[in-house]
Amino acid sequence: MEKVLSGIKNSKLAEWIGTKIGKTVVGTVLLSGIGIALPRIFHVLAGATAGATYLPMHIAVLIAALTFGVISGSVVAGISIVFSYLLTGMPTLARLPYMLIELLLYAVLLGVFSKKFSSYVSLILSLVIGRVLYAGVLFASGNIFGFNLAGISGVLDAVRTGIPGLLIQLAFVPFIASSIKKGIKLND
């Protein structure tokens, strides 16, 4: 057994996992799994409206974007939303493209802002600007394509409903991202 463990420690895979790219890939995969599992856990523990209230899928995307950057956050957004739908039927097929756009907006904004501002400022800017852009997407979808969407009032309702989730994100996401960076020595 000791020879096996020694072989793993000295392998090319172990060397690669120790690189920044390797850490980013492994972190992105793990956060994608969390992005799929966490909403399901919230729905089981807190009921059908838990997703809209606590925004659990957003957490994994935000942590990925803040820790590893735009690409990681975007990959976590895409994988989480698509596989969550395929495995659980949530979000609904009608809601899936809009939620994907919303999560991608957050991933891109947070990944970009985190290069210029502190984690907390970046997160606040991303959440505010992301919601404004998301409202624009809903408004455009309704007016250009004729979809019957709630538009701006729907976004305002979503913000009100999601206040507990926004507070969770503000309280924990920067701390978790910072802890991961330090723990895996991402900046080394």
Image: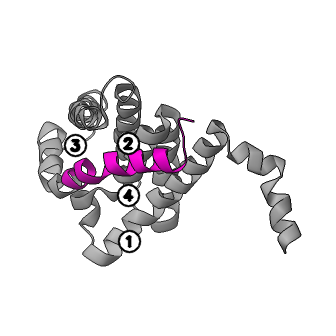
Per the rendered image, the range of residues in magenta is: 166-188
Residue 18 percent location from the top left of the image:
68, 45
Disc marking residue 92: 4
Callout 3: few (<14), some (14-19), or many (20+) C-alpha neighbours within 10 Å? some
Q: Main secondary structure of the magenta part?
A: helix
Q: Is residue 73 above or below residue 95?
A: above
Q: Quadrant of the C terminus?
A: top right
Disc 3 is placed on an element classified as: loop
Q: How far apart are the two marked residues, 4 and 1, measured between alpha carbons? A: 17 Å
Disc 2 is placed on an element classified as: helix
Give yes or no for contact between labels 4 and 2 (Cβ–Cβ under 8 Å). Answer: no
Callout 2: few (<14), some (14-19), or many (20+) C-alpha neighbours within 10 Å? many
> Label 1 is placed on what type of residue?
Ile
- The answer to whether residue 14 is left or right of residue 70 is right
Picture quadrant where residue 51 is located: bottom left
Callout 1: few (<14), some (14-19), or many (20+) C-alpha neighbours within 10 Å? some
Residue 135 percent location from the top left of the image:
22, 34
Picture quadrant where residue 42 is located: bottom left
> Label 3 is placed on what type of residue?
Leu
- Mark 3 and mark 4 lie on one chain; the one further toward the N terminus is 4
Q: How far apart are the two marked residues, 3 and 1, measured between alpha carbons? A: 28 Å
Q: Is residue 143 above or below residue 40?
A: above
Location of mark 2 (residue): 103
Residue 131 in view (yes/no): yes
Indicate how the structure is coloured in the image: one colour
Location of mark 1 (residue): 41
What residue is drawn where x is 78% and y is 56%? Answer: 9
Disc marking residue 149: 3
Q: How far apart are the two marked residues, 2 and 1, measured between alpha carbons? A: 19 Å
- Mark 3 and mark 1 lie on one chain; the one further toward the N terminus is 1
Disc 4 is placed on an element classified as: loop
